[in-house]
Amino acid sequence: MIENASVAYVHYLSFMLCFGALVYERISLKVDPSRKEAISMVIADVIYGIAGIALLVSGIYRVIKFGQGSDFYTQNPLFWTKMVTFGLVGSLSLYPTVTYVLWAIPLSKGELPNVTNNLVSRLKFIINIELVGFASIPFLATLMARGVGLS
């Protein structure tokens, strides 16, 4: 019982950390950030990445070991819709992550990254899509947990 609750807690906490990191990135993006602001963006993305991995691992663990059994989930098209949405959000996050990793190069030399208006607009657009995708995942999970999608 404790193990089940612990894995569920890690799953929910990871989701909240992912969403929070994305929101932080979205509202913090700006042209020519200060050193502190640029470093905080890199840190937020690291938190997002670690939480995303924890979310995936705890989710797999919940499907395999806990919940209503793997057949309940894998037979439901909403489960696969949720997985595809998670995969798309994760794939979209590659561009911002590579961007922030590239920011670390000048930051490590005491310089500031070159953050243009076009880059900020592009990152905000991508993060907006990620946020919409992430916000739809709990809705799909709620429907799935109630058997919607099963024949």
Image (cartoon, rainbow, N blue to C red):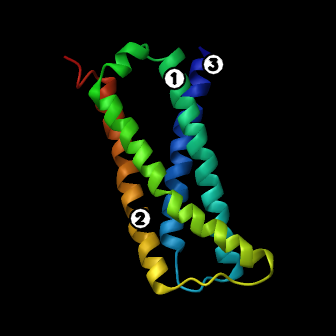
Please state if 38 lies on the left or on the right of 146 as rendered.
right
The label shown at residue 3 is 3
* Badge 2 element: helix
Q: Callout 1, which amino acid?
A: Arg
What percent of the width, then of the height, locates residue 4? 57, 19
Tell me which numbered mark, 2 or 1, is placed earlier along the sequence.
1
x 55%, y 23%: residue: 61
* Badge 3 element: helix
Tell me whether the residue at label 3 lies in contact with that at label 2, contact meaning CB atoms closer than 8 angstroms.
no
Q: Nearer the viewer, mark 1 or mark 3?
A: 1
* Badge 1 element: helix
x 52%, y 85%: residue: 116
In space, the residues marked 3 and 2 are separated at their CA atoms by 36 Å
Q: Callout 3, which amino acid?
A: Glu
Closer to us: 143 or 38: 38
Q: Spot the residue most to the right.
A: 109
x 54%, y 73%: residue: 28
Q: Callout 2, which amino acid?
A: Ile
Q: Which residue is mark 2?
A: 126
Q: Which residue is mark 1?
A: 62
Q: Nearer the viewer, mark 2 or mark 1?
A: 2
What percent of the width, then of the height, locates residue 19? 49, 52
Tell me whether the residue at label 2 lies in contact with that at label 1, contact meaning CB atoms closer than 8 angstroms.
no
